[in-house]
């Protein structure tokens, strides 16, 4: 059978693979605890659901413009001005089927065969695969845990070649939860302008930050860097709307026009009803977000303290998102339950088989000696999962 070499080179998402296995085990009646999938365990706020129901009842169930409704684009423009101090027009906004789709559009718009994209590791698992799907070459830039998994301007310069077209900036980060400071961002922006590099700025977790740390969009450091930045965002994490599949991007108008053309052929348009709900979410109250963020902070604090109290593993405290990267380097090379632990894949498999706890191995994130725990689950599950971890390591 003849098939695409490009498609054959793409690996499945390990986070979704783990989540699928977890759900199947749960459906089979097994007492499994899952920490895999990155979605809030809270319900979508009622006023957003009510807006969708009203849209259905009013018959808003037809095609919309391919790049999104004017009403939702206007809501995105207002959000970018209100939250990020950025001025955009609606012709610079593309509404897509989730932030993943926005990322695919962005890479497709800037890459030609052989163009390189610098991706700091640990990275969200889909970045390298998306680059490859758009004929680019992912270049992995390793970061250090002692630097909170963040790259510096000097690190970035070291990875630039004549073929470098762009780099990915994910702050707050999935999977590390780390947030770049204003000073760090300013230096990174300077390098982008100096080397004329596009910045794919994934800001999907911007409202899930804890303590005094603040989110700052790199596009806010002047017109020169703004003209090189494609902002990726959406409603999935902030408003507990993962299944609604609405993402958006803000980009220079010529790039946005190209992406709108491609999207018109790829998907027709994002879901009409979800677009109405997303506009209400962006313009609406934030009380539900505050409650969700407070709950995440409590869970994070417990998880970090508990992991660091267990011999053999450790972690650094994340500043945002809802993940903890647990370091298992001390376990590498040891035998556990008859299996030699060579990397996070081995650890995660044995942990799931022996203690029925599903965590995501860091291998797919470019961090083979770490595993990712999501605290977007109940405190009851977190306590149980970490108790099983402690028992597992004993």
Image: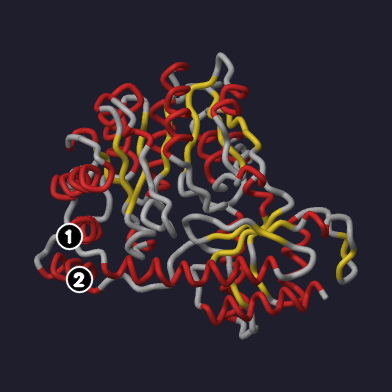
Q: Which residue is identified by label 2? A: 47
Characterize the local packing of mark 2: few (<14), some (14-19) or many (20 or more) Cα atoms within 10 angstroms. some
**Foreground residue, 335 or 319?**
319
In the image, taking residue 273 as reference, residue 193 lies left or right, namely right
- Chain-order first, disc 1 or disc 2: 2
Label 1 close to label 2 by CB (< 8 Å): no
Residue 385 position, x and y percent, is 64, 76
Residue 325 position, x and y percent, is 63, 57
| Residue at horizontal 28 percent and vertical 24 percent from the top | 223
Q: Which secondary structure, mark 1?
A: loop
Mark 1 against mark 2, which lies toward the viewer?
Answer: 2
In the image, taking residue 312 as reference, residue 22 lies left or right, namely left
Residue 250 position, x and y percent, is 29, 37
Q: How is the image coloured?
A: secondary structure
Q: Quadrant of residue 85?
A: top left
In the image, taking residue 164 as reference, residue 99 lies left or right, namely left
Q: Which secondary structure, mark 2?
A: helix
Q: Which residue is identified by label 1? A: 61
On screen, residue 116 above or below 172: above
On screen, residue 296 above or below 146: below
């Amino acid at each position: 059978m003849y098939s695409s070499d490009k498609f054959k080179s793409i690996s499945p998402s390990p986070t979704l693979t783990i989540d699928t296995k977890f759900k199947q085990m749960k459906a089979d009646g097994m007492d499994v605890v899952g920490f895999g999938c990155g979605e809030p365990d809270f319900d979508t706020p009622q006023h957003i659901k009510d807006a969708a129901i009203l849209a259905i009842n009013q018959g808003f169930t037809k095609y919309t413009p391919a790049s999104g409704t004017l009403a939702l684009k206007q809501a995105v423009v207002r959000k970018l001005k209100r939250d990020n101090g950025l001025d955009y027009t609606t012709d610079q906004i593309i509404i897509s089927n989730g932030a993943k789709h926005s990322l695919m559009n962005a890479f497709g718009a800037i890459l030609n065969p052989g163009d390189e994209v610098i991706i700091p590791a640990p990275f969200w698992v889909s970045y390298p695969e998306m680059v490859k799907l758009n004929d680019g070459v992912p270049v992995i830039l390793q970061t250090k845990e002692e630097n909170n998994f963040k790259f510096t301007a000097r690190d970035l310069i070291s990875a630039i070649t004549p073929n470098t077209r762009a780099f990915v900036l994910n702050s707050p980060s999935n999977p590390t939860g780390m947030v770049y400071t204003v000073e760090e961002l300013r230096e990174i922006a300077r390098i982008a302008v100096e080397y004329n590099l596009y910045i794919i700025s994934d800001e999907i977790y911007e409202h899930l930050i804890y303590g005094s740390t603040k989110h700052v969009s790199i596009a806010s450091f002047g017109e020169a860097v703004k003209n090189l930045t494609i902002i990726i965002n959406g409603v999935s994490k902030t408003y507990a709307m993962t299944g609604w599949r609405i993402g958006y991007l803000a980009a220079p108008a010529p790039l946005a026009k190209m992406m709108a053309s491609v999207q018109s052929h790829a998907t027709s348009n994002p879901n009409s009803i979800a677009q109405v709900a997303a506009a209400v979410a962006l313009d609406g109250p934030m009380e539900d977000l505050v409650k969700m963020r407070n709950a995440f902070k409590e869970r994070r604090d417990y998880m970090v303290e508990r992991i660091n109290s267990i011999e053999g593993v450790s972690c650094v405290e994340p500043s945002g998102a809802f993940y903890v990267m647990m370091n298992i380097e001390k376990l590498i090379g040891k035998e556990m339950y008859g299996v030699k632990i060579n990397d996070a894949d081995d650890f995660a498999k044995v942990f799931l088989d022996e203690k029925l706890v599903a965590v995501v191995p860091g291998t797919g994130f470019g961090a083979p000696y770490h595993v990712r725990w999501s605290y977007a689950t109940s405190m009851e599950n977190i306590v149980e999962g970490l108790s099983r971890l402690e028992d597992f390591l004993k």
